[in-house]
Amino acid sequence: MQIPVCRDVSQQENPEYNYWNSARRRKTKEQKSDMKKAGKSWKKKMIIILISVVLCALLVLGGLMIYGKAQMGKIPGLTFMDALKYTTQGKPDARITVGIIQDGQASFTVYGENGQILPEENHVYEIGSLTKTITASMISRAVMDGRIRLDDTIDAHLPLPKGKSYPTITELLTHTSGDSAYYFATPMIGNFFAGRNSFNGINRDMVLTKAKGLDMNRESYGFTYSNFGYAALGLVLEAVYNYSSPAQRRRYFAAYRPVSNRICALSSPVRTEQA
């Protein structure tokens, strides 16, 4: 009687197994390759999107700067009423108060949309660049108090890196420091989209950080209107009087009457002994 002999057939020796196993390995490899390609494609798309967003933002900002510069160029040729109507055109909430002091008598007129005259009512306004006049007056007082000299460079009063060429007080006062006409800081982006004042959120540390980056590479510069320059002067006043700008202004107006018939010469400042 012949007894059948059972022999194990290894999977590796099974042609059918080898076929399906190879197919499965190829499929797995293809899937991994597809996933890697998809990952690279996704990263590439994200990079393209980010670059596009940055370029669009730069184009918008550049366009706004060019438009603003073009509009500012029109101002010198406008009459008062032309400028008033242009500023208030199509703005129903516009309010502009113009005060006049003549022969010792004060009066004011309120203008609204399209330059229309409105009832004489008091309104609250942002003081804006009128702070520059106040700052310049306070600098004049600081010179007469012997706290600063107009030919001082700002590093004489602010903690700035050594070995750089910084603008003088005179250069900042007269917008001839060589600083860029446009001041930019990160909060300005949010301010733009929220419709807030451009300088909302700009603090002392930001101004000081920008001042640390200054380094004048020429002996003199032409006139370039600079908001930053007067912000830096505010820091100088804080340093020499040792209290904050708002407190300075309150004490200044409380302690001093307007300076009359006295000139603080820019060309030859006189330093007096500090009391």
Image (cartoon, rainbow, N blue to C red):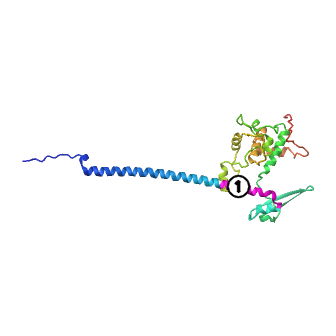
| Percent x, y of residue 218 | 75, 40
The quarter of the picture where residue 97 lies is: bottom right
- How packed mark 1 is, by other alpha carbons closer than 10 Å (few <14, some 14-19, many 20 or more), is few
Which residue occupies 80% across, 51% down?
130
Q: Which residue is labeled 1 in the image? A: 66
Residue 71 is one of the magenta-drawn residues: yes
The residues colored magenta run: 60-80
Q: How many marks?
A: 1
Q: Which element is circle 1 on?
A: helix
Which residue occupies 52% across, 53% down?
45
> Which residue is nearer to you in this view: 210 or 102?
210
Residue most extreme to the left: 1
Amino acid marked by disc 1? Ile
Q: Main secondary structure of the magenta part?
A: helix
Residue 170 is one of the magenta-drawn residues: no
| Percent x, y of residue 184 | 68, 48
